[in-house]
Amino acid sequence: MSTAVSPLAVPFPDMPPIEGVRFATAEAGIKYKNRLDVFLALFAEGTTVAGVFTKSKCPSAPVDWCRDSLKGGTARALLVNSGNANAFTGKKGRETTGLQGELAAKVAGCRPDEVFLASTGVIGEPLDAQKFAAVLPDAAARAADGPWVDAARAIMTTDTFPKGSTRKVKLGAATVTINGIAKGAGMIAPDMATMLSFVATDAAIAAPVLQALLSKGVVGSFNSVTVDSDTSTSDTLLLFATGKAAGAEVITDAADPRLADFARALDEVLLDLAIQVARDGEGARKLIEVRVEGAVSDASAKRIALSIANSPLVKTAAAGEDANWGRVVMAVGKAGEPADRDRLSISFGETRVAFEGERDPAYSEAVASAYMKNKEIVVTAEIGLGEGRATVWTCDLTKEYVAINGDYRS
Amino acid sequence: MSTAVSPLAVPFPDMPPIEGVRFATAEAGIKYKNRLDVFLALFAEGTTVAGVFTKSKCPSAPVDWCRDSLKGGTARALLVNSGNANAFTGKKGRETTGLQGELAAKVAGCRPDEVFLASTGVIGEPLDAQKFAAVLPDAAARAADGPWVDAARAIMTTDTFPKGSTRKVKLGAATVTINGIAKGAGMIAPDMATMLSFVATDAAIAAPVLQALLSKGVVGSFNSVTVDSDTSTSDTLLLFATGKAAGAEVITDAADPRLADFARALDEVLLDLAIQVARDGEGARKLIEVRVEGAVSDASAKRIALSIANSPLVKTAAAGEDANWGRVVMAVGKAGEPADRDRLSISFGETRVAFEGERDPAYSEAVASAYMKNKEIVVTAEIGLGEGRATVWTCDLTKEYVAINGDYRS
């Protein structure tokens, strides 16, 4: 497996502490010795929580656990591990999450239903909860308010760079911070596009309002990113709000106008993280932004955009730096959405290559091919039927993707 | 581009002549010089025809042409070219098919609406109909009743071996022959799974009956094969019946009991060709048969089977000879169909690896891994909810797929 950092990597931002959030990492030897594989976060009393999960019909035991814990709306601890997904582990898997919940509750001084769990790694292997017993008391004792890059690194598996995003924004009288981290890097497709992502803020927001913000925010971010069309059994995105910012007043109504700037900042954090995941798609060498305009509806535009973004032939053409717009036509055509060949136009970057069902009269293979050498490529399909639009992000499909995924488990 | 023959290739069968079918190939220099790129078939008067085409919303001009010609129900000529798909060529594309129809009608001595056309190759480049004018009279003069392997070779593009299938069967008092040829090899997904495929018989069957047989026959064959989930703008499957078998009586009723054996033989030819297409998927090293049983319906089983067969993570695991059944769980889960994690069982070949939501108690990594070294792999998912079943075929996803599709056009 390649250990080279993705050529599309971006630097980890300078992330400030969040009042009410402390965390630590540990080596529990879950799959490998001498590797960070546990992340524990502790939240101040009164922290609210929201979550979005994989739509898989075969979700992991931790996903089931989180869905249950979410009903209470409060969180005091988050326990994450890599090396074992605790997925497709049957009754034993549920026993493991129960034990994990008790162990984390003990060190956090809370009830088990205030504990949230996420696991990533191999499917179908029993996960031994006792491994957490050996490391959690010490981790809790060491928990500190930074550095966040350590948290981002602790949850990485095949990721080649840590992913973080941060914003500061006014919310009522208070200035609040939003920090998020994420891991990818394959098996990334809506819905959920993630993997694991955890976002925390010191804003004071009631759980139902937090959930509304998160559910809305994922539509244009994590649910608009695809690496390979595959969806994990374990995808988990959690948002925690400690309410500890100086001067924070609790927001209890999703329609509260004071939320507008906060919602925008949250959306930015989610989109930033989601695009970083695409930048670190397994074997990725190019970031591809697919814009669809003029579809009959936004939903139709999104289905067409995903058909383009998930097409192996479009993605291999990008890997080969080939301005093969015929494959974009193919992908529009196979989406099953209303489209009219004779109104369809396609651009690579600013260069229109096809116009109203034919090669553009001004088409230059040289110009189009030169554009494909960029690391970031924008493909626009103008359907010509309505006002629907959508943007999704993906990466190219390279031999390295095949290499990484042909030997990951062995 | 690799020129090595697929390790999954099968020998071309011994295909007898079909009374009423003559054909020839030619070099028209459509894209390259000194390459066979035109195939012309001529059919006896009274030949009936049926067709199934891509469901793409952006079909090629020849697909539009065939859909129109089918309305008449009779065929006298088939003109196929490689090197240029005449797709996304706008008004010029329609002019080209019109000219092709006239040119072929002239050499066949028929009306243009008795001509069928198929083109494969690059999308978006105008196709010059005059190139056909230069070769068709000579091709028609040379037309003969064999060898069929030449026909199969003439329609190949990135295929590594010619694909044919033949059956002889009693139909009423007559013994009739069914011959079929096909080309793949990428951009193969339902519906249509093809590419180009042409089947001919000397049976005497009215056009509506022929269409019913073909539409039924593709469901379990071409529409159950996927290479990469991509669907071409040009997929075309045509079935011609000359009625020239000695003693043939015309069948005019789809419910005629004499049709049973013929229908079975036709289905065998279609399935044989479709599986050969999967065997020659671009870069394929393994043939994967995905069986889904116990789904809530056959349609649900097929969607689950396609989710498994199209999963890049399942296909790369197969390429890596990795018995990664967790990815099969993932693919079942993402299909969006009714499934219950705790009833799901998975087998590789005869080896059950997962049972009722957990790793099988008797699971042996060594046994499962040894099985994955086979060239032909059967993956069975038992959903445990009902009686629905489906089988689909695909191939593994290798670095060669990426290599072939990263430089095809340049």
Image (cartoon, coloured by chain):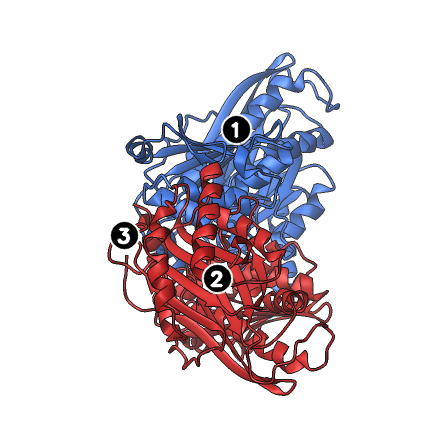
Chain colours: A red, B blue
Identify the residue under disc 2: A77
Along the viewing direction, whichever of B193 and A60 lies nearer the viewer: A60
**Residue B87, quarter of the rendered image:** bottom right
Q: In the displayed image of the protein, which residue is found farthest to the left?
A: A34
- Residue B345 lies, with reference to residue B31, above or below; the image says above
The crowding category of the residue bearing disc 3, from other C-alpha atoms within 10 Å (few below 14, some 14 to 19, many at least 20), is few
The crowding category of the residue bearing disc 2, from other C-alpha atoms within 10 Å (few below 14, some 14 to 19, many at least 20), is many
Amino acid of disc 2: Ala
- Residue B400 tag number: none
User: Element at badge 2?
Assistant: strand
- Residue A32 tag number: 3
Mark 1, mark 2: which one is toward the viewer?
2
Quick check: B250 left or right of A141? right
Q: In the displayed image of the protein, which residue is found farthest to the bottom?
A: A173
Q: In the displayed image of the protein, which residue is found farthest to the top?
A: B173
Give the percent coordinates (x, y) of residue A350: 53, 80
Identify the residue under disc 1: B269
